[in-house]
Amino acid sequence: AQKVTQAQTEISVVEKEDVTLDCVYETRDTTYYLFWYKQPPSGELVFLIRRNSFDEQNEISGRYSWNFQKSTSSFNFTITASQVVDSAVYFCALRLYNFNKFYFGSGTKLNVKP
Amino acid sequence: GAVVSQHPSWVICKSGTSVKIECRSLDFQATTMFWYRQFPKQSLMLMATSNEGSKATYEQGVEKDKFLINHASLTLSTLTVTSAHPEDSSFYICSARSLKTSASDTQYFGPGTRLTVL
């Protein structure tokens, strides 16, 4: 069975602080995708990143960076120099290769205060 | 990028009535669409997979007679909540899987529909 755990229910930081959102996943499959989505108060899911299970290279996109470690089954997301606009709920998700179903974590609500 | 729309974006209805939610892929064809439900402060849970021209596949615990899904074309899937009750109040999100070979494993999410049943 597949499972995604986001242990941090809610995080509050002050603007310009760095923050890391944790994601741990479980699967016995060797081929899968990992995702991060942002859900602002409007509700629409905003795609942030997709990572293939074969690609363990970390990725940086502007203030965002992702650390994928298969050894610990983790796919953590770091926001550098956080901004108020980063306030949202962030979901980590797993999808098996060639299967349609997403397994979403419970989400982490990030509050960035000015 | 690919766009998926939902209509309506929000709806309020009386208990016992039926509500139809549309999910459209605007600039691509999708043989498969998915319906998710998200209760307040909770995660997204897959309800059903909608396949164009065939019956939908429902996840365990989802009543297929209550949540009717129709996927009549490659760009449109509808979810009808029949005899809605207050406990059906939720945020319903659809996603669509692109047919394009280069993005065949990509799903695009709609903006969601907030249903409130009084």
Image (cartoon, coloured by chain):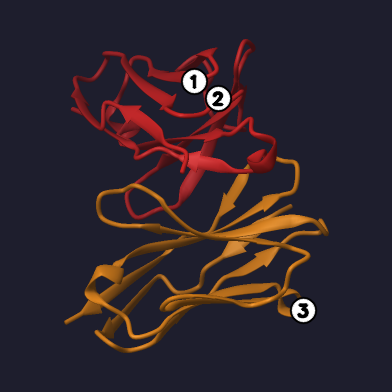
Chain colours: A orange, B red
* Mark number, residue B10: none
Quarter of the view holding residue B111: top left
Q: Looking at the image, is mark 2 or mark 3 nearer the viewer? A: 2
Disc 3 versus disc 1: distance between alpha carbons?
40 Å
For disc 3, the marked residue is: A71
Residue drawn at x 64%, y 33% is B100
Determine whether B24 is above or below B37 in the image: above
Q: In the rendered image, which quarter is residue B54 located in? A: top right
Residue B75 vs B53, above or below: the answer is below
Residue type at the position of mark 3: Ser
For disc 2, the neighbor class at 10 Å (few under 14, some 14 to 19, many from 20) is some
Element class at badge 3: helix
Q: Chain of mark 1?
A: B
Labels 1 and 2: the sequence-earlier one: 2
Q: Residue flagged by tag 2: what amino acid is it?
A: Gln
Q: Residue at x 25, y 69 (%)?
A: A85
Chain bearing tag 3 is: A
Can you tell which of label 3 and label 1 is closer to the viewer? Answer: 1
Marks 1 and 2 sit apart, C-alpha to C-alpha, by 6 Å
| Residue B116 visible to the viewer | no
Which residue is tagged 2? B29
Q: Are marks 3 and 1 in contact (CB under 8 Å)?
A: no
Q: How far apart are labels 2 and 3 at the CA level?
A: 38 Å
User: Which residue is labeled 1 in the image?
Assistant: B75
Say whether residue A98 is left or right of residue B114.
Answer: right
Could you say where residue B50 lies in the image, as x and y percent from the top left? 57, 23
Chain letter behind tag 2 = B
Task: Out of A61 and B71, give the one closest to the viewer.
Answer: A61
Tags 1 and 2 in contact by the CB under 8 Å rule?
A: yes
Q: Nearer the viewer, residue B27 or B84?
A: B27
Position of the C terminus of chain A by quadrant: bottom left
Residue type, mark 1 in image: Thr
